[in-house]
């Protein structure tokens, strides 16, 4: 997301916060967010794809709403506005193809209407089929969940993305030799998928509130959170959306503070650190362990300021529009152990995994394998959760190693904490403080070393870099 | 927090921003002299210059103070056992496609020369644009670092008067150019539109944002320079210097003999010699590629038709003799196989040949 786009977003959010009437709020947010889905999508080398992917995002959102919404809440009179808005946005953007100039609302000129019409017809047919179900059974909801996960795996696995690129290129008659996994960059899908999965699972469990299409769309596509979260919960988001919008000076002040802090973190600190942060190129060029650590520290802080900066901006933007998004970071590098680090790093993601994977898996293992000792259950659940979190970033070996590193670290800390309960309960306060400082330093360095796997795509490069850091080369 | 408080914060913030902008424009601070180089970071072996910063860990900027502050030359006081030599010139001295140790300066340093019992230390002050005025500007700045001897690489392409202000470093330092014009009566016009003279608004913080960002980026890339010792991109393959040419034989608008001396920047060269005094100055004609390809009877290489270059060499020799300059004509020292992507860019072996020649001359210099 560019600084210009963010500044425009801030202006738009402030304007909306000032003039938005409660009656039109969900519709306005949906309109802006749907436009942002197109505007933020990066240009792609495969013809028409940078228009089709945002279109599929809108269609998937509408389809999922149909699946998770009880028939009485799907009534036309309550939702016609949102349907007209989404269709109108799609048609209007499609028609910009015939203007004599390019609008900055799409990454490139929209494709021939035939492609969009075919997509629209396919999803309209799907919608008709789904709408036939008055009460979608668990099987259909599970199928939808698996479909989203399948799509996710396709996008996050470089070998599979490459195959999709080859397929689309051959359909388009484009050069196959230029195909690359990055041809399929689908902006925001990672976060949109989490929100869709959350609603489908909550629908299965009977916990999902009935919401209108406009509310659902505004939640799933909410433009401040498209590219970097946080991942909100729908019931919380919609309760903010339905609350009368009364922005006080305190709200504006807090929003401004978060925006300034976020812009400073992202565009001053993170972007400056990025110039000297560890990457695949400089890892093999660096001379000496000392400089290796400097590059690693730069990466460690860059990734934090970048990510938490974006979260601050999203929280500030949402605040201007009366939405109080959940916090995503809380000084994670200052925490005295790895468990607390993960309770304070990308909190909305870890809470999502805790709710939809870690806790159910723990319950299942406890219920289904009564002879399994508690440490084994803890080991399995923590390693599996961290592996899943790591694969969310990309289905590659280096991310898997990063997940394993953290899974093992969490397990070791869990065992240590269990053992320490009996030995360190009566420590004097001064010793406890010293232990916390030592713990924070140790945790920080453990996390920093883990980023080596994250920054260097090739595990052999990561191992060489570890060697350099500990004086084995250079 | 109330509306009144927010309004005050906004107004005060705006005022402070305006005051800082105006103060910055009215009293421009010499920020270029502030540098992490030679303190927290290693000084650079050559002046900052680079086109793809994320790969070369280097960048081109226009602040000569910042460029010098980043250079190893400014690291500290000269020690009594150092014989300090500065090398001026274009990209062939700076060392395009060469690692710092492979450049002329690097190879001279590796030769471990001594003069009067003092160890020769050569500092690379070449810069990859071709203009005698640019060299003179760098020489003026370098004088304060007490050189014992100065090497100045010359080539005809640095001489045409119309090329003098083409170098962005010259064009964007009008105050320095004005000083040079006044001190040495150079045949340049302060009103030359090529000289970039920012108005008041362009001198504010907002107007100077690019220059300020460059200063910051120079410091940040210094970390990777210090960490890796890399300051340019070293491609494994590149387009070799051109050896086949069209039959074109004009040179800067002149189509044949004689090469008009009045259109060459002899006064810039004389100013440089005056600026260097009393430090011994060694002028050398840079080796260049002598092509044997198509139309090589008309042209030596991409830069020079034979007639123009031959006449310039003759004029240069004449001037050197008349003025008793310490001048070496090394134009054909290096065989064609030892050039890289340009008719004046040498391979490490080519630089070695040049360094060997110049090393002898340096060692013959009188004791300071």
Image: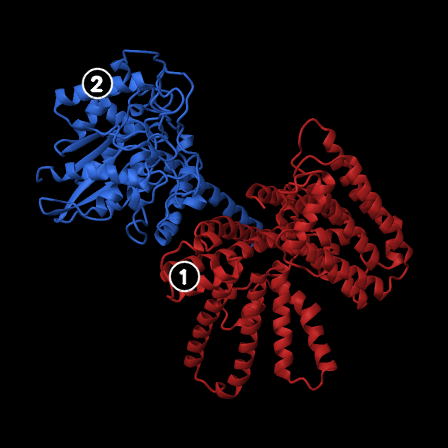
Provide residue A45's location: percent of width, then percent of height. Answer: 64, 40
- Where is residue A418 drawn, in percent x and y? 55, 83
Quarter that holds the C terminus of chain A: bottom left
Describe residue A233's horizontal placement relative to residue B196 as left or right: right
Q: Which mark is residue B315?
A: 2
Residue B120's x, y, as percent? Answer: 17, 45
Residue B145 in the image, given as x and y percentages of width and height: 19, 41
Up/down of A463 relative to B18, above or below: below
- For label 1, the crowd category at 10 Å Cα-Cα, with few meaning under 14, some 14 to 19 and many 20 or more, is some
Q: Is residue A299 left or right of residue A221?
A: left
Residue positioned 89% across, 62% down in the render = A135
Q: Is residue A180 left or right of residue B192?
A: right
Which disc is residue A293 wearing?
1
Q: Residue at x 66, y 36 (%)?
A: A108
Label 1: element kind? helix
Residue nearest the observer in this picture, B191 or B247: B247
Tint applied to chain A in the drawing: red
Q: Which chain is blue?
A: B
Label 2: chain letter: B
Q: Is residue A348 visible?
A: no
Which image quadrant for residue A50? top right
């Amino acid at each position: 997301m560019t600084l210009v786009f963010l500044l425009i977003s801030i202006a738009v959010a402030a304007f909306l916060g000032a003039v938005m009437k409660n009656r039109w709020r969900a519709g306005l947010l949906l309109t802006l967010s749907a436009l942002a889905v197109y505007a933020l999508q990066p240009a792609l080398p495969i013809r028409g794809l940078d228009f089709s992917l945002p279109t599929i995002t809108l269609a998937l959102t509408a389809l999922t709403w149909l699946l998770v919404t009880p028939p009485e809440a799907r009534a036309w009179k309550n939702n016609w506005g949102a349907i007209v808005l989404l269709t109108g946005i799609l048609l209007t953007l499609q028609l910009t193809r015939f203007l004599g100039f390019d609008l900055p609302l799409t990454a490139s000129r929209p494709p021939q209407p035939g492609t969009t019409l075919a997509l629209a017809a396919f999803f309209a047919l799907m919608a008709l089929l789904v709408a036939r179900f008055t009460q979608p059974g668990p099987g259909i909801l599970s199928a939808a969940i698996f479909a989203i996960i399948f799509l996710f795996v396709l996008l996050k696995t470089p070998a599979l993305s490459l195959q999709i690129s080859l397929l689309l290129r051959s359909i388009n008659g484009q050069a196959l030799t230029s195909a690359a996994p990055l041809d399929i960059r689908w902006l925001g899908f990672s976060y949109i998928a989490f929100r869709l999965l959350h609603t489908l699972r909550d629908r299965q469990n009977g916990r999902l509130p009935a919401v209108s299409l406009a509310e659902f769309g505004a939640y799933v596509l909410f433009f401040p959170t498209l590219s970097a979260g946080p991942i909100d919960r729908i019931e919380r988001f919609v309760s903010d959306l339905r609350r009368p919008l009364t922005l006080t000076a305190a709200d504006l002040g807090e929003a401004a503070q978060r925006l300034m802090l976020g812009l400073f973190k992202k565009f001053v600190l993170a972007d400056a650190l990025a110039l000297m942060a560890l990457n695949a190129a400089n890892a093999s060029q660096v001379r000496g362990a000392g400089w290796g650590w400097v590059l690693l520290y730069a990466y460690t802080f860059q990734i934090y300021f970048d990510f938490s900066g974006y979260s601050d901006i999203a929280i500030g933007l949402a605040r201007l529009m009366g939405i109080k998004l959940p916090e995503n970071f809380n000084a994670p590098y200052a925490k005295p152990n790895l468990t607390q680090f993960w309770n304070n790093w990308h909190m909305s993601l870890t809470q999502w995994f805790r709710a939809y994977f870690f806790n159910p898996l723990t319950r299942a293992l406890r219920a289904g394998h009564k002879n399994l000792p508690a440490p084994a259950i803890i080991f399995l659940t923590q390693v599996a959760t961290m592996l899943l979190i790591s694969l969310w970033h990309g289905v590659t070996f280096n991310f898997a190693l990063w997940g394993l590193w953290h899974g093992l670290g969490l397990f070791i800390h869990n065992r240590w904490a269990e053992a320490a309960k009996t030995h360190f309960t009566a420590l004097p306060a001064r010793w406890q403080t010293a232990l916390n400082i030592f713990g924070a330093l140790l945790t920080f360095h453990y996390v920093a070393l883990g980023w080596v796997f994250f920054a260097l795509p090739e595990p052999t490069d990561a191992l060489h870099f570890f060697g350099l850091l500990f004086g084995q080369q250079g | 927090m109330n509306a009144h408080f927010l309004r005050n914060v906004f107004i005060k913030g705006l005022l402070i921003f305006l005051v800082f902008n105006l103060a910055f424009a009215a009293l421009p601070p010499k920020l270029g002299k502030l540098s992490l180089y030679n303190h927290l970071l290693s000084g650079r072996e050559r002046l900052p210059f680079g086109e793809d910063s994320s790969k070369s860990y280097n960048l081109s900027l226009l602040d000569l103070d910042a460029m010098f502050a980043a250079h190893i030359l400014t690291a500290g006081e000269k020690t009594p056992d150092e014989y300090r030599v500065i090398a001026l010139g274009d990209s062939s001295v700076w060392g395009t496609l060469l690692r710092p140790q492979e450049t002329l300066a690097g190879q001279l340093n590796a030769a471990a020369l001594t003069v009067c019992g003092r160890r020769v230390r050569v500092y690379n002050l070449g810069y990859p644009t071709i203009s005698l005025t640019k060299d003179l500007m760098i020489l003026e700045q370098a004088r304060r670092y007490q050189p014992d001897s100065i090497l100045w690489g010359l080539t005809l392409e640095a001489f045409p008067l119309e090329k003098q202000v083409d170098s962005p470093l010259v064009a964007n330092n009008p105050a320095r150019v004005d000083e040079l014009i006044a001190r040495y009566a150079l045949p340049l016009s302060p009103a030359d539109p090529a000289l970039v003279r920012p108005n008041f608004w362009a001198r504010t913080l907002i107007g100077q944002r690019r220059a300020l960002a460059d200063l910051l980026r120079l410091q940040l890339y210094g970390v990777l320079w210090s960490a890796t010792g890399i300051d340019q991109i070293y491609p494994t393959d590149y387009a070799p210097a051109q050896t086949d040419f069209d039959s074109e034989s004009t040179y800067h608008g002149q189509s044949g003999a004689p090469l008009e001396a009045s259109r060459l920047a002899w006064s810039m060269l004389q100013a440089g010699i005056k600026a260097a005094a009393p430090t011994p100055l060694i002028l050398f004609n840079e080796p260049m590629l002598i092509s044997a390809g198509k139309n090589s009877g008309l042209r030596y290489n991409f830069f020079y038709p034979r007639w123009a270059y031959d006449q310039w060499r003759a004029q240069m020799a004449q001037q050197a003799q008349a003025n008793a300059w310490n001048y070496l004509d090394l134009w054909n020292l290096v065989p064609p196989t030892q050039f890289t992507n340009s008719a004046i860019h040498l391979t490490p072996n080519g630089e070695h040949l040049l360094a060997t020649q110049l090393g002898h001359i340096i060692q013959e210099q009188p004791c300071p």
